[in-house]
Image (spheres, rainbow, N blue to C red):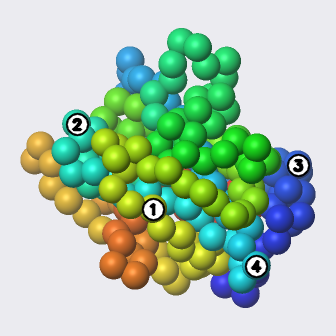
Amino acid sequence: MELAPTADWLRSRFAAGAAAGQTLDIGHVVENSTHASVLIPLVLRPTGITVLLTQRTAHLNDHAGQVSFPGGRRDKSDSDPTATALREANEEVGLDLAQVEVIGVMPEFWTSSRFRITPVVGLITPPLNLKLDDFEVADVFEPPLVFLLDQANWRRDSLERDGQRREYWAMPWQGHYIWGVTAGMIVNLQRFLLG
């Protein structure tokens, strides 16, 4: 991918909205799914924009050990999906909300594990002084946005669950395996931005 997105370009793309006829993946629609939100944190580094991702701890009930965006279930006190995403990012990684500029909300992404996730996209101004929730987050890392948006770095992997073979997107990066719902939302982000 030759494009090196800037903060202004990203703002303009979200202000313009999705292109007509654009196809975004909504995942696996499952009735009675739990509402959740994630923050897609785009960190404005001097060397280029990166994406802050978390490695979940191995003992969690949901998605243990997986790479994910900061986020989680909607609380009754959350006014909307953006409030959920920001609260969860603050709780999980200690992100200072004064450093977050929300630039857009992507369409919901449904999971086979019964979550209905709203991805909220935010620009993050460094420096970051993160404080990880040791119960939920084992590590954080920041792949470059240009790497994640480049289709040459995507692949289709599969697994068998309950006797059915399921395919999913994957984007390995420096020993981290970005896959499943997180990779699917990155694919949607790329399609939204470049579609």
> What secondary structure is marked by label 1?
strand
Query: What residue is at 54 percent from the left and 12 percent from the top?
Result: 76
Distance (Cα) linking label 1 and label 4: 19 Å
SS class, disc 2? loop
Q: Can you say whether 96 is above or below 2 in the image?
A: above
Give the number of the mark in front: 2 or 3. 2
Q: Amino acid at mark 3?
A: Ala
Q: Residues within 10 Å of mark 2 (few under 14, many from 20)?
A: few
Callout 4 secondary element: loop
- Where, by quadrant of the figure, is residue 191 drawn? bottom right
Per the image, the residue denoted by label 4 is 46
Outermost residue toward the left in this view: 163
Q: Earlier in the sequence, mark 1 or mark 4?
A: 4
Real-space Cα distance between discs 1 and 3? 29 Å
Q: Residue at x 58, y 14 (%)?
A: 77
Q: Is residue 97 left or right of residue 168?
A: right
Q: Name the residue: 21% across, 51% down.
A: 58
> Counting other residues with Cα less than 10 Å from the Cα at mark 1, is it few (<14), some (14-19), or many (20 or more)?
some
Give the residue type at disc 1: Val
Q: Which mark is residue 140?
A: 1
In the rendered structure, are the residues bearing label 4 and label 2 in contact, judged by CB atoms less than 8 Å apart?
no
Looking at the image, is mark 2 or mark 3 earlier in the sequence?
Answer: 3
Q: Which residue is mark 2?
A: 61
User: Along the polypeptide, which appears first: circle 1 or circle 3?
Assistant: 3
**Closer to viewer: mark 4 or mark 2:** 4
The residue labelled by disc 3 is 15
Is disc 3 placed on a helix, strand or loop? helix
Viewer-side residue, 65 vs 165: 65
Instruction: Tell me which amino acid carries mark 4.
Output: Pro
User: Number of numbered discs present?
Assistant: 4
N-terminal label among 3 and 4: 3
Image quadrant containing the C terminus:
bottom right
